[in-house]
Amino acid sequence: MKFSFFHLMPYPYLPDDFDTAYDSASLTYPNRNFDPEQGVQLYQRYLDELEYADVLGFDGIAVNEHHQSTYGLMPSPNLMAASLARRTSRARIMVLGNAIGIRGNPLRVAEEIAMLDLMSGGRVDSGFVRGIGWEYFGHSINPTKSRARFNEAHDLIIKAWTSDEMFSWYGDNYEYRYVNLWPRPVQRPHPPVYIPGSGSTETMQFCAEHRYAYMSVYAPTKIVRRWFDGYRSAAADLGYTPDPEKIAFSVPIYVADTDQRAHEEAKPAVEWLYNKGLKQPRQLVQPPGYVSPGSLRGMLASGLRGFAAPYEDIIANGQAVVGSPASVAERLGELHEQLGGFGQIIGLFCIGTATHAQVMHSSELFAGEVMPALRSLGVSAAPAP
Amino acid sequence: MSTDAPAEDYLDLSGSGRVHLFRAGAGEPVLFLHAAGGAGTWPEFHARLAAGFDVIAPDHPGFGKSDDFPEADDITDLVYHYLDVLDALGLESVHVAGGSFGGWIAAELAVHSPHRVRSLTLLSAAGLRLPEYPPADLFATPPEKIPALLFRNPPPAPSPDAEPDIDAVLAAYRDSTALARFCWKPFMANPKLERRLRRITAPALVVAPDDDRVIPAQHAKRYAERIPGARYAEVSDCGHAMYFEKPAEFADVVSTFLNEVNR
């Protein structure tokens, strides 16, 4: 099992009337509520936490991209990764990922990841995401082109990384007469690719075809199981069983010295994440054309709803893992079983309103007591369904 | 009102897909281009119009029962699509009328091929970029708030407890996806359209409801100013849903205009 410390870099200071006064934490939540002085402190704190995870022995430290949101303060994950590249020495630097569906110029992403790969001595993992629905509103990108833009940007980036001859690119979405990447990445053939999925069958197939790591986003266990099974079965259709490391379970994790203390401290933080940070109306999450008819039918039939839920349900549904080191290890082992296996845990340790001290202590306990207990899990291939 | 059920037909367009259309009535041909809503239906307004005219009401690409025509992804493609439709129908020229999104297509068609448009009727048409008066963003509006934007007097809302019909949700998502394909950016507009409106030669009527909460009335007024010789009319006590909210009034205004043009 590999373990990563994932950060969302939330802006946790919401007004008391947030629940009633605002219908979304993203896109339309007014930026007058952002205090730059607090922002200065938050970036220092969050980067410290990621750097500390490297010291603690996490295999990876992970950042991602979000726009116009209190949920995550990383419009540019590559800026965060650049900072981490020079301040860490061991952990993989996981960019999970660049939202290539909404980028105007995907060649720029190829260039930045290549730079990061060199700056970090080949420690970069490159995630690609389409971008959440609201980001298609925010950056005025047509969501009906999302899949096509994502696929084409991906193909262009991979070719730019791997070609040692200049080439031209004429696609439906992008045109370049001169592609000649300087610098080229150091990892061969290119940095490992991760793709977070949230139920689109197209994403599962895409991952399986390219043998990329498939990473879940936060959802109830039975739904994540469907996604992982979808990925495994897409791989089986192609005649192979994915390596466990290619299946990454992503979940908020909070560890304290006792179960009671862990739940007391985690409850407000987890509730903030699901009920405030992820408050996002459906029409902003799934703008027209963002999901295919087949995937939408699957999502409606599976009963996937919004994120808001009581704490107890979130815990019971496996959307957060909270407890003493022993309880957290046991629960993750149980989820490993229920999800049909995975070889990576991508933990969100800074959950919502959790304090710096809480995040540091939780990470220490996880690295010191949970990781050793689970290290041997998920190293053998899970059988395809 | 023509009480006959309309004929339903499919036009095959040179291998790229099929267009579903309704057709009823007799007389001068009127190509009616539907709004964002209303694809695949034959509402009262259409039936009233068909009392005096040969009304042809196709579903746009990706809407209603028409195929996707995925190669079409901007307003110019829609203009060529409707030129293909007219060719397939064997009609050299027609009266063209359209509501909202369909009104935008109608205006573009009249700009592109003035000789094929006997008259032009725009019902609160989208298509102009007036940054001071942007259209409401229905894509970003919660579904339960949409009726209040569309209607001056919204119909009663369905029970919130009603279990959603997955097929109905998928059909609505398909229509909305088709709309977004053509309208997301530039948003509901062709920035070049306004200065091209002078090319229109057909007699034109611009109609607006008096309480449009989706496309501000300034759009209709600007159309009326820029289209040579255009007339302007208002329907009172009515929202953007127009011919769904006041079918008799809209049918009356449009029929009167078409009859005058034909005299």
Image (cartoon, coloured by chain):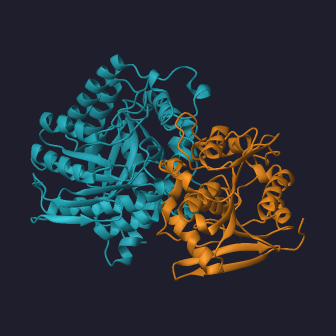
Chain colours: A cyan, B orange
Q: Where is residue B189 in the image (x, y as percent from the top left)?
A: 53, 49
Residue drawn 29% across and 55% down? A194
Residue drawn 23% across and 28% down? A48
Q: Quadrant of residue A329?
A: top left
Q: Position of residue B193 (x, y in %)?
A: 52, 51
Q: Where is residue A51 in the image (x, y as percent from the top left)?
A: 20, 33
Residue drawn 14% across and 33% down? A87
Residue B169 to residue B2: above or below: above
Q: Position of residue A375 (x, y in %)?
A: 26, 51
Q: In which quarter of the image is residue A320?
A: top left
Q: Quadrant of residue B90?
A: bottom right
Residue drawn 24% across and 41% down? A78
Q: Residue furthest top?
A: A37
Would you say residue B99 is visible in this rendering? yes
Q: Is residue B20 left or right of residue A7?
A: right
Question: In this orientation, which residue lies closer to the viewer: A152 or A306?
Answer: A152
